[in-house]
Image (spheres, rainbow, N blue to C red):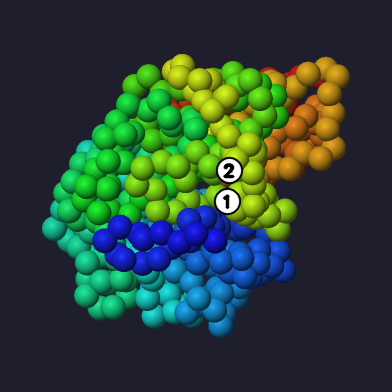
Amino acid sequence: MEYRKLGRTALDVSAIGLGTEYLMEQPQDTVTAVVHKAIARGINYFDLVAPDAPSRDKLGAAFAGRREQVLLTAHLGCIERGGQYRVTRDPQVSEDFFLDYLRRYGTDYVDVLFLHNNNSQEDWERLTEPGGLLDLARRFQEEGKARFIGLSGHNAAVALQVVESGYIDVLMFPVSLASDAVPGREALQDACVAHNVGLVAMKPYAGGNLLREGHIIYAEPYQMGRTQMKGAPTRFEKTATLTPVQCLAYVLSQVGVSTTVPGCENLNELAEALAYWHASEEEKDFSAVLPAFKDWASGQCVYCNHCLPCPMEIDIGKTLSLLDEAQRQSTTAVQADYEAGPIGHGARRLGRRSMTTLRADYDALPVKASDCVECGDCVERCPFEVDIIAEMHRAVEIFETAT
């Protein structure tokens, strides 16, 4: 394992860390096995977003007795209500969830406390207003409950302003092959170096999209650092299948990157990420596919569920993931080894399944697309300008009325 300085924090972080969202729905033995193997292989940086209590309990159990071996993060403003992910800017609600985090992880402090999911100028102003979440984070820092303050976001222009403000020690931002042509990317990374702000590269696989089989793939504004920016890409045509090693090789070659946090939901995926360390230069070479990530478009769902909460409790991300797979479905291909990601994150690698299987998965959803009341709240929240109401109509046509 290689270790790098995390900006001005002077913390030594493993160049490959671990994102834990894909572990949220895994059983305890899988969570524990992945965390313990990661630590044994030298990973010391863990991003812990999981807002729900059961996931925190499972991860807390996995880290039991190992707190001194790891660097743990937490996110202010990421909560769960009624089984649905939510972003909040309420200081009291955020404080309650953070203190619950400390209890469930059995620790007195976190190493980096992130202001969660800042993507607009207006939101940044709200975070930094007197009595806002930045002040709350600073209080936790003064109380010894947080060593350093960070921010996570998906808008290069806003992130640049945040880095230059001097308010944060660490930036968590999407860095991947799919973001290579994003305007402002180089300036943001250079600013992190100039201001000695540690850069944590999230979404190194662009939400799993870069690992999809086939030549046509999608990667969205949220996954590339262009949320709420015009002209974002959706569709790319690559010349070859990408591997986790190639994706990580690109990310770790980028200026300013301290660590990257690939999501791994099992030991096999962890091994695929850690294979980077013994891969040959030929296996790391991503140059042949780089030209594919230069064209721009917009409007594709990435199943992130930032559109939630839905008043009808529709799992929008899962519904649209099934819809997109059905619409891509050929009449001939059925692949048994399809692996779906956790609900709200869609498929990490899309193989092909029969329509019978897709309809069965859709029928198992507790709330269907036909229950949509077209309130429009989800459309307003969507960072990618997806016409979610129209997509709900398509889901009804395909899964509820088609024969």
Question: Quick one: SS at disc 1?
Answer: loop
Q: How packed is label 1: few (under 14 Cα within 10 Å), some, or many (20 or more)? A: many
How far across and how far down the image is residue 361, in percent?
75, 39
Q: Nearer the viewer, residue 204 or 77?
A: 204
Residue 183 position, x and y percent, is 32, 26
Q: In this view, does 353 lie to the left or right of 189?
A: right
Residue 21 image point, x, y percent? 55, 54
Q: Mark 1 highlights which residue?
A: 263
Outermost residue on the bottom side: it is: 65
Q: Would residue 36 be found to the left or right of residue 157 on screen? A: right
Residue 173's place in the image compared with 10, above or below, is above
- Could you say which disc has been placed on residue 377 in the image? none
**Residue visible at 51% across and 25% down in the picture:** 290
Q: Do callouts 2 and 1 mark residues in contact (Cβ within 8 Å)?
A: yes
Name the one closer to the observer, 338 or 396. 338
Q: Name the residue tied to disc 2.
A: 345
Q: In which quarter of the image is the N terminus?
A: bottom right
Task: Find residue 213 and report its horizontal and vertical position in percent.
Answer: 70, 29
Say which element carries label 2.
loop
